[in-house]
Image (tube, rainbow, N blue to C red):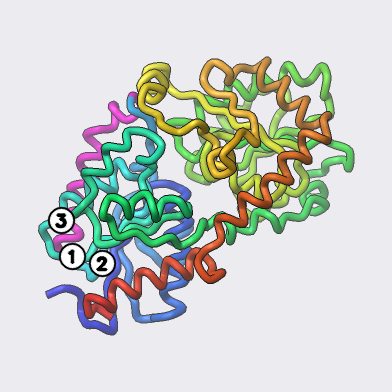
């Protein structure tokens, strides 16, 4: 017995971090628009809660990244995995959807493989970037994989995995719809103030690595760009951590947790420093010139460098096939290097314009099939899978 009936399917969703929470919320909204009787259970954050979703346990318990950083939390993660498996076994949903967070999600999919429940993974594991042999472990983990990048459909298809490209959700993020005047008025900024966006990440394990470097960089910038106003957009999950970390900065930043305020900050910004990942695509959509920077535990960095198989870390560079934005990683994630790059972004209009020109072509390639919004394309994939198995 799976689910209550074909008209009231139960979909169990796992989102393990802030970006997955956003995807899950949009997916729930799109599915309910087509079938208001669909029920949901699982693990999610505030964005999914706003759609009426009740999380089995706090999503923040899963928001950890890095080979070394994860070790102290192995026992807690193991308990949460057991809890998720028990809930799925008890509820017997019609479909389990895991969103990103491969470290936890793929273990969950493996644990429930013998239950006869449909499984879907949303956001392809980036095995094409490093340790490509891992793809051999995926057959049998899910019934369908939803991918965000156009080349992933072909990559996973070569390995016999049913894969569907649904478009990249950044295109419906609204990042390009910010209002610069509204941001300056709300925060009392002069028209000539140089707004610098600093994006340290969405996980509690990564934020403390970038914020001290950003603070030291601002101290160097004060001598040459005294009118720079730093803005730090972060998720509510790490807001308290960020507020504590920036108390002693030489220039107190504007910490932004509201999505609209973040997009307004993008519209007002003349430059940005960001961690690698989806944030680079958000900034590209908003037309903000940027440099990408990142720092992890040295042991983690050593291991990753031996395994990585792509020439670029920044998503915009990877999609363009060349270095559109500077990548300042590990030893180059240093205050003097970052300060020099920020000055260039603010004072070299040609360099900034070259980035913006490249962004348009990159974003065009991320449009979903038939021009559908990514969440709608993902909802179609979910309903198609359920219908194929007679569950809806």
Name the residue tied to disc 1: 117
User: Where does the image place residue 146, in percent across and percent down from the top left?
Assistant: 38, 59
Q: Nearer the viewer, residue 126 or 265?
A: 126
Q: Which label is found at residue 95?
A: 2
Q: Report if the CB atoms under discs 2 and 1 are less than 8 Å apart.
A: yes
Left or right: 68, with 141 as reference point: right
User: Where does the image place residue 159, in percent across and percent down from the top left?
Assistant: 27, 50
Q: Residue placed at 27% from the left, 72% from the top?
A: 10
Secondary element at tag 2: strand
Which residues are the magenta region?
68-91
Q: Residue placed at 53% from the left, 39% from the top?
A: 318
Q: Is residue 90 above or below residue 340?
A: below
Q: Nearer the viewer, residue 153 or 260?
A: 153
**In the orientation shown, which residue stands out farthest toward the front?**
158
Residue 159: within the magenta? no
Q: Is residue 139 visible?
A: yes
Q: Report if the CB atoms under discs 1 and 3 are less than 8 Å apart.
A: no
Q: Residue placed at 80% from the left, 31% from the top?
A: 346
Q: Is residue 148 above or below residue 321?
A: below
Prevailing SS of the magenta stretch: helix
Secondary element at tag 1: loop
Quarter of the image where one finds residue 79:
top left
Quadrant of image for the C terminus: bottom left
Q: Which label is found at residue 113?
A: 3
């Amino acid at each position: 017995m799976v689910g209550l009936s074909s008209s009231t399917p139960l979909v169990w969703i796992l989102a393990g971090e802030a970006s997955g929470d956003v995807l899950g919320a949009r997916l729930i909204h799109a599915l309910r628009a087509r079938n208001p009787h669909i029920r949901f259970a699982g693990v999610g954050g505030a964005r999914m809660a706003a759609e009426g979703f009740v999380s089995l346990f706090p999503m923040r318990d899963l928001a950890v990244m890095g080979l070394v950083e994860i070790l102290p939390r192995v026992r807690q993660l193991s308990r949460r995995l057991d809890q998720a498996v028990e809930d799925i076994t008890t509820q017997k949903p019609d479909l389990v959807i895991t969103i990103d967070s491969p470290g936890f999600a793929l273990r969950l999919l493996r644990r429930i493989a013998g239950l006869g429940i449909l499984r879907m993974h949303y956001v392809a594991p980036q095995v094409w970037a490093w340790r490509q042999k891992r793809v051999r472990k995926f057959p049998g983990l899910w019934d369908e994989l939803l991918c965000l990048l156009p080349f992933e459909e072909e990559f996973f298809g070569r390995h016999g995995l049913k894969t569907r490209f649904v478009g990249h959700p950044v295109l419906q993020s609204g990042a390009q719809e910010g209002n610069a005047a509204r941001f300056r008025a709300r925060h009392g900024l002069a028209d000539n103030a140089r707004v610098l966006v600093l994006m340290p990440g969405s996980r509690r394990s990564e934020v403390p690595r970038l914020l001290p470097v950003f603070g030291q960089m601002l101290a160097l910038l004060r001598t040459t760009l005294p009118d720079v106003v730093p803005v730090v957009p972060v998720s509510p999950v790490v807001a308290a951590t960020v507020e504590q970390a920036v108390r002693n900065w030489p220039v107190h930043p504007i910490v932004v947790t509201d999505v609209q305020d973040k997009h307004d900050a993008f519209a007002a910004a003349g430059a940005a420093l960001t961690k690698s990942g989806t944030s680079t695509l958000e900034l590209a959509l908003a037309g903000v010139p940027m440099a990408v920077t990142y720092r992890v535990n040295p042991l983690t960095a050593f291991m990753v460098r031996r395994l990585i198989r792509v020439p670029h870390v920044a998503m915009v560079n990877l999609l363009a096939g060349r270095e559109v934005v500077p990548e300042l990683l590990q030893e180059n994630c240093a205050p003097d290097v970052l300060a020099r790059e920020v000055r260039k972004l603010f004072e070299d209009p040609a360099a900034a314009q070259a980035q913006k020109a490249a962004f348009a072509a990159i974003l065009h390639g991320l449009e979903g099939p038939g021009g559908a919004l990514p969440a709608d394309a993902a909802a179609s994939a979910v309903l198609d899978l359920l219908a194929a198995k007679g569950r809806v």
